[in-house]
Amino acid sequence: MLEKVLTGPRTFYLWLLFLVCVIGACGLVYWQQLQQGLSITGMSRDVSWGLYISQFTYFVGVAASAVMLVLPAYFHHYKKFKRMIIFGEFMAIAAVCMCSLFILVDLGQPQRMLNVMLHPTPNSVMFYDMMVLIGYLTLNAIIGWVTLEAERLDVEPPKWIKPLIYLSIIWAFSIHTVTAFLYAGIPGRHYWLTAIMAARFLSSAFCSGPAILLLLVFIVRRLTGFEPGRDAVKTLTTIITYAMCINVFFYLLEIFTAFYSGIPGHQHPMTFLFGEHAGHVTWVSNWMWAAVIMALGSLVILIPPAWRNGPLLPFALIMLVVASWIDKGLGLLIGGFTPNMFETITDYAPTCMEISVALGVYAIGALVLSLLWKIALGVKREAGHFSD
Amino acid sequence: MNKSRRSFLKVAGLSAFALSSGVAALSSTAQAAATMPGSSYKMGAAALKAKRWAMVIDTRAFKGPEDYQPLIDACHKAHNVPTIKGSNQNIKWFWLDKFDHAFPDDINAYQAAGIKERMFPLLCNHCTNPPCVRVCPTQATYQMHDGIVAMDYHRCIGCRFCMAGCPYGARSFNFMDPRKHLPKEMPNPTFPTRMIGVVEKCTFCAERLAVGQMPACVEAAGGRILFGDLDDPNSDVRHALAENYSIRRKPNLGTQPGVYYLI
Amino acid sequence: MYNAKAVIVGAVIFAVLFSSPFWLNFGKDDYKRPDVVLPKNEKECVEPVEYMRAEHMALLNQWRDQALRNEKRVYVSSTGKEWTISLQNTCLKCHNDYANFCEKCHIANSVYPYCWTCHITPEGKK
């Protein structure tokens, strides 16, 4: 099936070339980071995790979201998702690659990375996170490849793949739960110390991941004519709407607990993120308010069925993705570390070099995704599953 | 693809995997065999021993920040701690902060001025239930049998999970090469520095206890900081705690800090 | 065979690249054991020289783990002699010529351990 990447239009290869150039340029910035250490980032003694770890967290969610296609198709025999599943699985592979790379670029001593396996530590959540991510990558690679090959040969997938698919459904929930446990099990970080963290992570993943998938599929539809199926898009949009409602609801629960209980430690991260804290206004608060507006805007379009299935859908999805990205990709980390352990404020903003390295990882993810989706599209076209 | 060729490739792949894991297993047994027969390890004869090391700081006996400066200097000199001025990517083993920052759970707008304005020395608490040890994915930070939370800088991968985990901000990360911020002549040539990309913190001077010396800050404090075995009812620290009112930082988190402050 | 030409050319290129270190070094001088400068005043290392030559890195790892994790900072050698465990203060006390002892052999064998980013060599800051 690999030969499918060898035949394509010129624009596809220009796109790949562009990605390779971006990766190369950002790779040079990473090389600088290897020389000068993480001093090139905006992180500090008080805000010791930043953009890298927050992007890792966001993309674990994107990886887990493939389950929103796999679960209805295999647990509820919803056949209409079958044509799109492979794109979800392949997006999960690209997302897990990005997660691993975001962890790698965040390490102070990346060459010692395998110490995590050399000295396995069952009391560390990081250890489990590594295992579930490797497991999820393997599962999706096997399942995606085997089912796609069966489709190409026009035969039923082998029977042994079914248990793996069921396992991958449960596994998807586990990867994001374990990632939430990285945060939710830490004493003294008020913004993270909440039992609802894993539920919030899952709900935000299950709206933002499928939203990204749909947006990308819409682009592919425009470029290649691949038709994901009207009903499939409709159902997935409904799933996204429910997940987003739950996501917003969960955040409001956090706000209630913090402010009705009146416990200062629980309020401070939120007053810091959304307004003034001890006379200090942060740049993040503009972003947080933008997220609030976009989250509500997306819900306004998504909730009425007529609008949800109309031409406004892509705008709603874009707003949803940006809002969830700000919440999880910026607010979560910054609110967790500020106010710091001394209840004072150390500002954090990513530096240009830090953003470049992150962009490089994004480009690698896009490259992996482009190649995998090219294969999938080629097989779909050959097997006649390209449109209705 | 030809069926037999495919099965050949599968078998070949599996054999390569089995072979490489076999080699890996062999090399790890070779590591174990490297011990010289007849050799052994033991504690030094002069080493100070305790079941649970703890520190009691009599903050009443210090007049102001200048009283603490010799302690900070002694600590940072003994461990080649770099001074990185004007950066929040700096390294701190032993430092000072105000009451409201050191004990943020104990905020009181009408606190006596003597306490509100006083500076308090901060260092690693060497907790009984250390969150940093719990979260470390490589056991680069670990708890020793005498209660000291120690670090193996050789093993640290620099993931900084421990810094997120520590509720006391006691850990510093080497964002840059620490030797750039140390004088050409090392302050203490008998002690190593750290390297770029690892986390570091106070060690309760485990290397000094091993040769029968008290921690550097305790020695420099001239009796105003007590250091001893919390498990021994007759130790100095237990007497001091029995006779004085003492507090610890963020006790409600259940970490059981090993550093006590007499107020 | 499909694309026989391309496959054969590819296989030849692979074989040449794969064996290139062998060809590039063919006919060059044999490996010579580097002339390390041994300590002048000390005759005896912690263990016999053959063992130290082959296993010093493993021994140092054991020293590190025993000293840091088990608080056992004294090594009793196979001859019964006691040594304080310290790369910087025990090993380097006798082996004080870093450039002509450690480094010389490491370079000759293309190994680049990073001991000295933390441990201070007798010459001071390296």
Image (spheres, coloured by chain):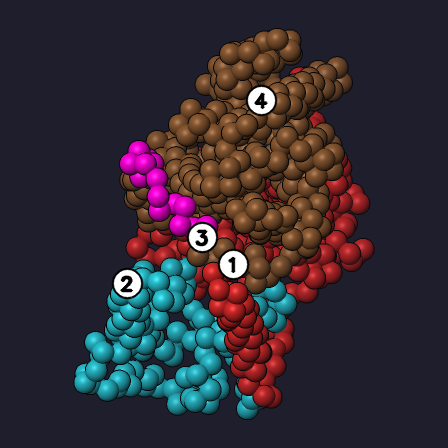
What amino acid type is highlighted by mark number 3?
Pro
**Magenta stretch: residue A268 in it?**
no
Is disc 1 on the same chain as disc 3?
yes
- Amino acid at the residue labelled 1: Leu
From this view, report whether residue A321 is shown above or below residue A198: above
- Relative depth, front residue between A100 and C124: A100
Give the Cα distance between marks 3 and 2: 39 Å
Q: Which residue is disc 4 drawn over?
A: A230
Task: Using a 10 Å C-alpha cutoff, classify the residue at mark 4 as few (fewer than 14 neighbours), some (14 to 19) or many (20 or more).
Answer: few
**A16 sits left or right of C47 in the view:** left
Residue on which disc 1 sits: A114
Secondary element under disc 4, as helix, strand or loop, is helix
User: Callout 1: residue from which chain?
Assistant: A
User: According to the rendering, which colour does chain A have?
Assistant: brown
Q: Nearer the viewer, mark 4 or mark 1?
A: 4
Label 3 sits on residue: A110
- Residues at marks 4 and 1, CA–CA distance in whole angstroms: 46 Å
- Does residue A2 show up magenta in the picture? yes
